[in-house]
Image (cartoon, helix red, strand yellow):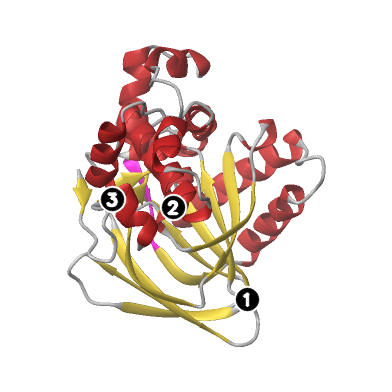
Amino acid sequence: MVLNDPSTPAPIPERTSPVGLESYISGTTLISGDGPAWKDVFVQIFSRNRVQHPFLVPAVAEPMIVWVMSGSATVEERNLGGEWEASRVSVGDFFLTRSPAPYEMRWHADGDQPFQVMHLYVSVPLFEKVVRAMLDKAGGNIALKDVSGGRDTAMSKILSLLHGELVRKSSGSTLFVEGLALSLAVHLVRHYGVAVSGVRAQNALPGAKLRRAVALMATRLDQPFDLSSLAHAVGMSQFHFSRLFKKATGLSPSLYFIRQRVAKAQQLLQETDTSIIEIGLAVGYSSPSHFAQIFRRETGLSPSDYRRG
């Protein structure tokens, strides 16, 4: 299921992945953690626009922390159809959410410093492992409090250490990052966990496997969609992979692949003079009419209109 956002022609999904979320929030990705050291936490550093008009934020399965690293801003949030709630934030403040539903945000940064934030996602398997070890409960029976504009000295120290590993040329020590991720998950459960009765555990594709599948898709945009090879690459059956991928992203693997193709085509249409026929071929469509049909369905515009406008 998707939600229509009047500010963009393409629909916004109700749920997405940590990798997918960045495409719905404007700004510049400065650095992103990946590789063996980062299987339990996914970390990204962003430079955000100084003024962000209201937009829908899809829900993400993983517990998410947004930590202010530079600048200050007034950030407003609201549930769909609800009242805006404002938080004044500066360096060291954080947001914590594991919202099961999309919500709306906007902000206005001030001062001379760029508005830069860290996004950190704790993998669902690690979170559930920590909950079981600490509380002898299923991870789905423990929710995390939503925090907006909070300040937590212990958490800031862990996030600062993770940032230090992120920017190391060696991509970070696996043992150190794993230890920090475990410490962070314990801290979240200990200080922000609340019991929720009657809630089943929400299994989703682990972050490392999700990123591997998404990265593999990105290298094969000019080839036919191949569910079998994607499932094999992450060590799952096709049925199990498809089910958990959709839980994590809100989209089937095949539709997510189509969205990747369209996103690449949009980039090529805006940044190059390559012909529309060649762009269609580059993203796997040998028929210009089929390419145009898919592109219009996903964006609301024909490829030529998108390039002009």
Does residue 143 show up magenta in the picture? yes
Q: How many marks?
A: 3
Mark 3 residue type: Thr
Magenta extent: 141-146
- Residue beneath the point at 30% across and 56% down: 305
Give the percent coordinates (x, y) of residue 86. Answer: 37, 80
User: Is 270 located above or below residue 88 in the figure?
Assistant: above
- Is residue 229 left or right of 183 when viewed as pictured? left
- Residue beneath the point at 47% across and 50% down: 267
| Separation of marks 3 and 1 at Cα, in angstroms | 31 Å
Does residue 53 show up magenta in the picture? no
Give the percent coordinates (x, y) of residue 213. Answer: 48, 27
- Is residue 259 left or right of 117 when viewed as pictured? left
Of pointers 2 and 1, the one earlier in the residue sequence: 2
Mark seen at residue 299? 3
Q: Quadrant of residue 119?
A: bottom right
> Label 1 belongs to which residue?
114
| Separation of marks 2 and 3 at Cα, in angstroms | 14 Å
Asked whether the residues under the numbered discs 2 and 1 touch, taking CB atoms below 8 Å apart as contact, a structural biologist would say no
| Separation of marks 2 and 1 at Cα, in angstroms | 20 Å
Evaluate whether residue 138 shows in this view: no
Q: Residue furthest left?
A: 81
Camera-side mark, 2 or 3: 3
**Front in this rendered view, residue 52 or 158:** 52
- Quarter of the picture containing the N terminus is top left
Give the percent coordinates (x, y) of residue 263. Answer: 41, 45
Q: Quadrant of residue 173?
A: top right
